[in-house]
Image: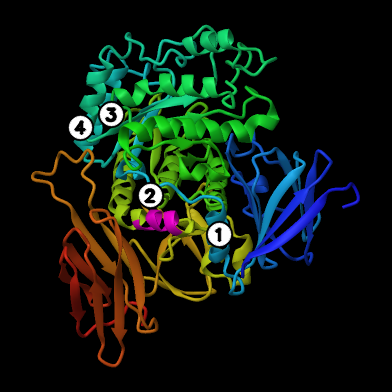
């Protein structure tokens, strides 16, 4: 280097090259020039310009503020993928900027004099899943959350208002939700307190519950636990004025200077100071001590700290929150989720997409947001079903129904109710309640499937919500599609993201697809279909040869089923054009992966299914032209053979 610095490189594996830069300058970076037709993905969760592709984009690696479609959508990572056949990961929390303004060109600059980055190339052309596996192996892989993390999970932006019937305080407002879910037999596993809930300024900072609204917090949390719900609370690294957190931080000099505590609702603590970190951790530990099983981790990018500290402080606060919970509940006994998360944070928290707008633009951006989150390694992702930023009568019944269908096929079903927007209260109708029940219970029934892919993400980093090109890399048409995704390898999901109930669906090459809900229409890969659906339906398709484990394996709030016991249903969709297929099921009892293999025999018109120790028994269902063929599913493993099979895909 001309400035007296140095660059060194080393092939640390056949597919990964490590580059180290040391410079006398304050900034270092790199530029990558490809063919002008090559595309780039990654870096930010937020879908700039409503697309999964990084095109004509230049921005810092920091949190987005109020934006089109979604406010504060802020999972991010110093990692991008190129269709030229490589990816680049810069291992640093220093503030940086990325630029994708010139066709075929990517550039980054980091505010540091020393930088290590990696160039990743797969052994097999277009194997983008292998690239993500290498990246997350260098960085970090996803946490394995508890069963309650899949939801459905319900919350209100303010449980201290919008009372109905007998309700007189926030505690009773939660009980009203519990009662309605029970009455309608809607599965749910979690509730959480968004602020306000404490006595501090803007409710947070005194590490308590306001006795006016939460007169018996410990008993209240225990009651929710007994009803089958885990309970989380809102937290943020912000010292609100005149709270215990603020006063202690001022006294000890822990706050970032020059930030108005009123205008910005409180500056952040500098958690790089060990005493500040330990104090915050000790005081926050009050919540798990009384039964709280996770945090909704908010803020971190609203001006409460210098911009160049965002990534550093985000990482520290996510770790601090994780430590308070893991010391009480163990690694898989709680669920933290954050809107602002950086790179390795996926090992200690899941993410939600920020404050989506409650309109169809918000839904469209949310779908792309979930796909983008997966491309940077954040597999367990969720959104506020119906949107968070609500004005007037938003969400409309149509929007809410469409969003519910989308949430059913995401890792976690999360829904904000209350403050005048609750499905079982006016202005909404019984039709919407039935759609909520339909989609929430479908999602609950898919937990065996979702949990299996969540475990796989902890092992290989590959997300469950997948950009189409991850599964169909040879199909050039899929690389810019931002409103369809694969859910695992098996499902093609195409949410309706516009008013009116119609959309065009593209079916990626390489497979045939069966309409999932009615199981009648089959579509060839490479074809396009125009669909028009009522609110009760959504375009979801299953690939030929798929195996889908479903079932009621998490009791949660299901107190309406007498003598409840877990039950699995393994669905199989044989095609004689698919020689064999295997689903890797996660046995939550033994905490081991178990193969389920389907072997069709066209000459004999038979299908054999072989499976290992499932931990839970149930039913095998083969879907055929003659209807459903069933066999018992043994908990300890076994084999079933079906004769005279006529494939739906023939």
Reading the image, the residue beneath label 1 is: 132
Q: Nearer the viewer, mark 3 or mark 1?
A: 1
Q: Work out whether mark 2 precedes mark 4 in sequence or the reverse, and give the earlier one.
A: 4
Alpha carbons under labels 1 and 2: distance apart:
25 Å
Alpha carbons under labels 3 and 1: distance apart:
40 Å
Residues tagged 1 and 2 counted as in contact (Cβ below 8 A): no
Rendered location of residue 107, percent (x, y): 77, 52
Alpha carbons under labels 2 and 4: distance apart:
23 Å
Asked which secondary structure carries label 4, the reply is helix
**Is 455 part of what is drawn in magenta?**
yes
Rendered location of residue 498, percent (x, y): 53, 48
Asked which secondary structure carries label 1, the reply is helix
Graded by Cα atoms within 10 Å as few (under 14), some (14 to 19) or many (20 or more), the crowding at tag 4 reads: some
Reading the image, the residue beneath label 4 is: 227
Q: Residue at x 57, y 33 (%)?
A: 314
Number of marks in the rendered image: 4
Spot the residue most to the right: 2
Q: Work out whether mark 4 precedes mark 3 in sequence or the reverse, and give the earlier one.
A: 3
| Residue 211 visible (yes or no) | yes
């Amino acid at each position: 280097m001309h400035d007296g610095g140095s660059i060194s490189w080393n092939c640390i594996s056949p597919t990964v090259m490590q580059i180290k830069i040391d410079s006398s300058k304050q900034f270092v970076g790199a530029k990558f020039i490809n063919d002008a037709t090559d595309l780039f993905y990654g870096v930010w969760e937020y879908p700039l310009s409503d697309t999964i592709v990084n095109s004509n984009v230049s921005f810092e690696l920091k949190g987005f503020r109020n934006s089109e479609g979604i406010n504060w959508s802020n999972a991010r990572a110093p990692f991008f993928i190129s269709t030229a056949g490589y990816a680049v990961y810069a291992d640093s929390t220093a503030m940086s900027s990325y630029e994708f303004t010139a066709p075929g060109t990517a550039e980054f600059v980091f505010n540091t004099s020393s930088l290590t980055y990696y160039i990743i190339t797969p052994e097999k052309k277009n194997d983008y899943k292998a690239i993500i596996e290498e990246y997350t192996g260098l960085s970090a892989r996803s946490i394995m959350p508890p069963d309650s993390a899949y939801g459905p999970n319900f919350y209100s932006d303010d449980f201290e208002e919008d009372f109905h019937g007998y309700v007189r305080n926030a505690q009773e407002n939660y009980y009203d939700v519990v009662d309605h879910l029970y009455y309608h037999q809607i599965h749910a596993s979690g509730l959480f307190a968004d602020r306000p809930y404490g006595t501090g300024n803007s409710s947070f900072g005194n590490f308590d519950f306001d006795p006016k609204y939460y007169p018996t917090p410990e008993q209240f949390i225990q009651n929710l636990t007994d009803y089958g719900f885990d309970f989380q609370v809102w937290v943020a690294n912000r010292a609100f004025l005149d709270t215990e957190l603020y006063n202690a931080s001022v006294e000890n000099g822990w706050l970032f200077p020059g930030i108005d505590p009123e205008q910005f609702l409180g500056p952040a603590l500098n958690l790089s100071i060990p005493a500040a970190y330990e104090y915050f951790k000790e005081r926050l530990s009050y919540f798990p001590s009384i039964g709280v099983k996770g945090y909704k981790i908010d803020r971190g990018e609203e001006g409460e700290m210098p911009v160049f500290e965002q990534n550093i402080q985000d990482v520290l606060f996510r770790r601090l929150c994780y430590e308070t919970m893991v010391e009480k509940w163990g690694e898989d006994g709680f669920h933290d989720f954050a809107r602002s998360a950086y790179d390795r944070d996926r090992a200690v928290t899941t993410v939600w997409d920020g404050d989506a707008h409650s309109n169809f633009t918000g839904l469209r951006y949310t779908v792309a947001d979930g796909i983008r989150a997966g491309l940077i390694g954040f597999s367990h992702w969720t959104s506020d079903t119906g949107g968070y930023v609500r004005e007037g009568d938003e969400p409309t019944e149509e929007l809410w129904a469409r969003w519910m269908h989308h949430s059913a096929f995401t890792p976690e079903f999360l829904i904000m109710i209350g403050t005048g927007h609750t499905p079982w209260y006016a202005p909404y109708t019984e039709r919407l309640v039935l759609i909520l029940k339909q989609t929430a219970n479908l999602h609950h029934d898919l937990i065996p499937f979702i949990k299996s892919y969540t475990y796989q993400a902890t092992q290989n980093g590959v997300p469950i919500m997948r950009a189409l090109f991850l599964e169909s890399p040879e199909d050039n048409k899929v690389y810019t599609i931002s409103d369809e995704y694969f859910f695992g390898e098996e499902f093609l999901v195409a949410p309706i993201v516009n008013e009116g109930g119609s959309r065009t669906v593209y079916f990626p090459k390489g497979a045939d697809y069966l309409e999932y809900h009615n199981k009648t229409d089959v579509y060839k890969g490479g074809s396009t279909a125009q669909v028009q659906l009522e609110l009760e339906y959504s375009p979801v398709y299953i690939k030929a040869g798929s195996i889908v484990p479903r079932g009621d394996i998490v009791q949660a709030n299901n107190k309406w089923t007498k003598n409840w016991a877990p039950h699995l249903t393994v669905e199989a969709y044989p095609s004689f054009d698919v020689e064999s297929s295997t689903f890797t099921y996660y046995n939550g009892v033994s905490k081991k992966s178990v193969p389920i293999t389907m072997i069709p025999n066209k000459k004999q018109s038979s299908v054999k299914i072989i499976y290992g120790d499932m931990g839970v028994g149930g039913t095998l269902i083969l879907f055929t032209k003659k209807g459903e063929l069933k066999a018992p599913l043994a908990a300890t493993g076994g084999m079933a053979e079906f004769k005279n099979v006529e494939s739906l895909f023939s």
